[in-house]
Amino acid sequence: MSFKLAVLASGRGTNLQALIDASKMGEMPAQVEVVISDKKEAQALKRAQDNKIPAIFVDPSSFPSKKNFEQELIRILNGFDYDLICLAGFMRILSPFFINNVGKPIINIHPSLLPAFPGLNAQKQALDYGVKFSGCTVHFVDEGVDSGPIILQAVVPVEEGDTEETLAQRILQEEHRLYPLAVKLIAEGRIRIEGRKVFIE
Ligand code: GAR
């Protein structure tokens, strides 16, 4: 298995877990090589350790600027052999500096049907707006916020009486299916990008 992932995560890490599990089950021809977090207490780091994957905390507050923090991320990433960066609940916007200098493609999973409800609290935005369907999106990361070419999307119905938590949970189940599938397509070389359109071959 040669396709390798670097995962950046800030929190509970269930999408990271979905990638680890899919790799172990042979559902995705890729493996998680390193996990980096900007939060010391992130459960994602614990999940990595439990699976004998290098787990690295980088404290943003110990750098004088965002650029210095991102330089450190790049320095650490350069110490690993990997093909693709997967953001999995990484709650920081990466600057054009990082995106243009890291030298590898970056994908993200977002809990809405982009371009609707980018940014924070996507599930709350969907409920407040009153949409009947939401979902999740896996996309390439570009210099905007949740604006890069869309690889895959899954639709999730909004049900009467949904709270932010119940909707988030229903969407999360689809995220766990979609993210490994997107990685699988990339690892198999089946993704072609033309402008902002992604074709699956
Ligand atoms: C997921 O729902 C992911 O889509 C979302 O954060 C959650 C992380 O959960 N990401 C964003 O909102 C990014 N803008 P996890 O830590 O259990 O994978």
Image (cartoon, grey):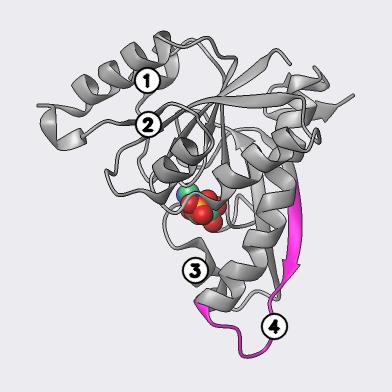
Secondary structure at numbered mark 2:
loop
Give the labeled residue for mark 3: 125
Give the labeled residue for mark 4: 159
Name the spot of residue 172 as percent of width and height, x first. Answer: 62, 60
Q: Is mark 3 within 8 Å of ligand 1?
A: no
**Residue found at x 51% / y 76%:** 164
Question: Residue type at mark 1?
Answer: Phe
- Mark positioned earlier in the residue sequence (2 or 4): 2
Name the spot of residue 91 as percent of width and height, x first. Answer: 38, 46
Dot 1 and dot 2 residues touching (CB under 8 Å): yes
**Residue found at x 29% / y 44%:** 39
Name the spot of residue 137 as percent of width and height, x first. Answer: 65, 48
Give the alpha-carbon distance from disc 4 to disc 3, as whole Å.
Answer: 15 Å
- Mark positioned earlier in the residue sequence (3 or 2): 2
Outermost residue toward the bottom in this view: 161
Give the labeled residue for mark 1: 98
Dot 3 and dot 1 residues touching (CB under 8 Å): no
